[in-house]
Amino acid sequence: MCATVANKEGPNPPMTGDNANSLVAAVTSSRTYQNFQRAFTKAVGLPISFSAVECWQLSFHGKECESPLCSRMATDSRCCTYCLQVQQELSKSAREEMSSKTCGLGLVSTAIPVRVGSKLIGFLQTGEVLPMEPTEEQLQEFHKNIIKEQISIPYAEMKELLMRTKVVPPEKYEAIVGLLSVFAEHIALICNQILLCHQNAEPPAIQRAKEYIQQKQCQALSLGDVAKAVNTSTFHFCKMFRKSTGLTFTDYVSRVRIEKAKNLLLNPNLRISEIAYEVGFQSLTHFNRVFKKVTGKSPTDYRAHLSVI
């Protein structure tokens, strides 16, 4: 199951970076989305979220009907990292069709991909529910699972929070997801309308330049290289790019690379120096400086405070 709106474009990679975040923000701030969100949470008592493909925030944190246990997990950086990894696995499995995933604590979440043509825009999600009230044996197993992840939540606290978590039988949950999939189709239409308006306002050369930068972001990029790639003079491209994006070419490329770095920082096994070079920075000092300028935090602080980002 996938929400899609057809268009004339050929195969495209997922929409990422500033374009994706801006589109998702436009959708979630629309009256249609907000009205449905209120009605959905009130009717079924589950959280709902629409997020970009590359999302480094917990989808339901701080939202109405968030699971009590998930809310508790989000306050601890180690727990938060685990939850983000589970979310990334769910997103990866949902790139083609709707997918559900059960975490180590027995909570089920579902993601429905939303596309415009062949371009994956993001995921409409719900979940953080139990399919049935857990037995004492299952609770013991859940606690063993989080201990393996080096998460230190006392058994009594985990049990108390899980017992307050909403229980939705599989048949009812399937019906709820079916309802959400219908709305996902409507979101695809909204996305298409927004993209068409944006494409009509933005010069084709800028569209091609953004795609080129996205594809080559890990390599050395110069203004002249990108201008040549889109068959435009360097002088004209520089003026046109600034007018269309509101950013200098250098600032735009830096932001694209920082967005990629944010995603990589979710992996605790990657050193910050490795991430800096992976996303295209040639100097760790420069990476640290640009990262703090864009996010307001150093890479180290950003990684340490994932739970509050």
Image (tube, rainbow, N blue to C red):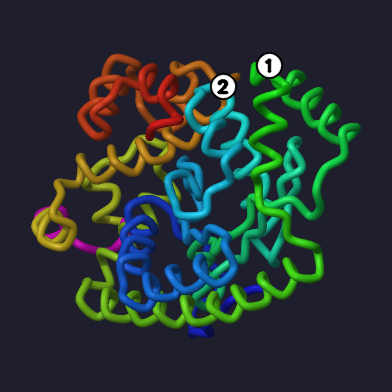
**Chain part drawn in magenta:** 229-237
- At label 2, counting other C-alpha atoms closer than 10 Å, the crowd grade (few under 14, some 14-19, many 20 or more) is some
Residue 68 lies in the magenta stretch: no
Per the image, label 2 sits on a secondary structure element best described as helix
- Residue 44 appears left or right of 172: left
The one nearer the camera, 27 or 247, is 27
Query: Residue at label 1?
Result: 150
Query: Of the residues shown, which amino acid type is indicated by label 1?
Result: Gln
Residue 31 in the image: state x and y as whole percent: 31, 76
Q: Amino acid at mark 2?
A: Arg
For marks 2 and 1, the one nearer the N-term is 2
Residue 241, horizontal then vertical, whole percent: 17, 57
- In x, y percent, where is residue 141? 85, 29
Circle on res. 289: none
State the residue at coordinates (45%, 82%).
189
Height in image: 230 above or below 304? below
Residue 157 is left or right of residue 106, and the answer is left
Q: Quadrant of residue 152?
A: top right
Which of the pair 89/202 is nearer the observer?
89
What residue sits right under mark 2 in the picture?
78
Quarter holding the N terminus is bottom right
